[in-house]
Amino acid sequence: MDCPRCKGSMITEVFEDMKDDTGHICFYGYRCLICGEILDPVIMANRENRPHMQARNRKLMASSRA
Ligand SMILES: [Zn+2]
């Protein structure tokens, strides 16, 4: 795994988060040894999903008002 920023080597690391209703969740991600960039599958998935959902909601609200 190469860092998208600096192309340095990244290591697998366990991260902990409190986002979920279930409480404590752990997941694996990557951390760059050179610049400290962090990549994790949860954040990447959220970044991809949320904008689409917001855009859809906005369109629905706009069309129901008009
Ligand atoms: Zn890096």
Image: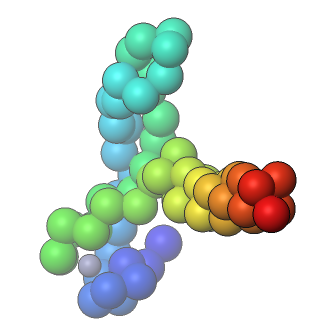
Q: In which quadrant is the C terminus drawn?
A: bottom right
**Residue 18 in the image: x percent, y percent?**
35, 23
Q: Residue furthest front?
A: 66
Residue 60 in which image quadrant: bottom right
**Residue 12 in the image: x percent, y percent?**
40, 51
Circle count: 0
Task: Classify 59 as above or below 5.
Answer: above
User: Splitting the image into four quadrants, where does ligand 1 fall?
Assistant: bottom left
Q: Say which of 2 and 58 sits in front.
A: 58
Say whether residue 26 is left or right of residue 56.
left
Task: Classify 25 as above or below 40.
Answer: above
Residue 11 in which image quadrant: bottom left
The colour scheme used here is: rainbow
**Residue 6 in the image: x percent, y percent?**
28, 89
Residue at (76% x, 55% y) in the render: 65
Q: Residue furthest bottom?
A: 6
Q: Residue furthest left?
A: 35
Q: Say which of 66 and 9 sits in front.
A: 66
State whether residue 56 appears in this view.
no
Say whether residue 62 is left or right of residue 46.
right
Residue at (60% x, 63% y) in the render: 51
Q: Residue furthest top?
A: 22
Say whether residue 34 is left or right of residue 1.
left
Residue at (37% x, 37% y) in the render: 14
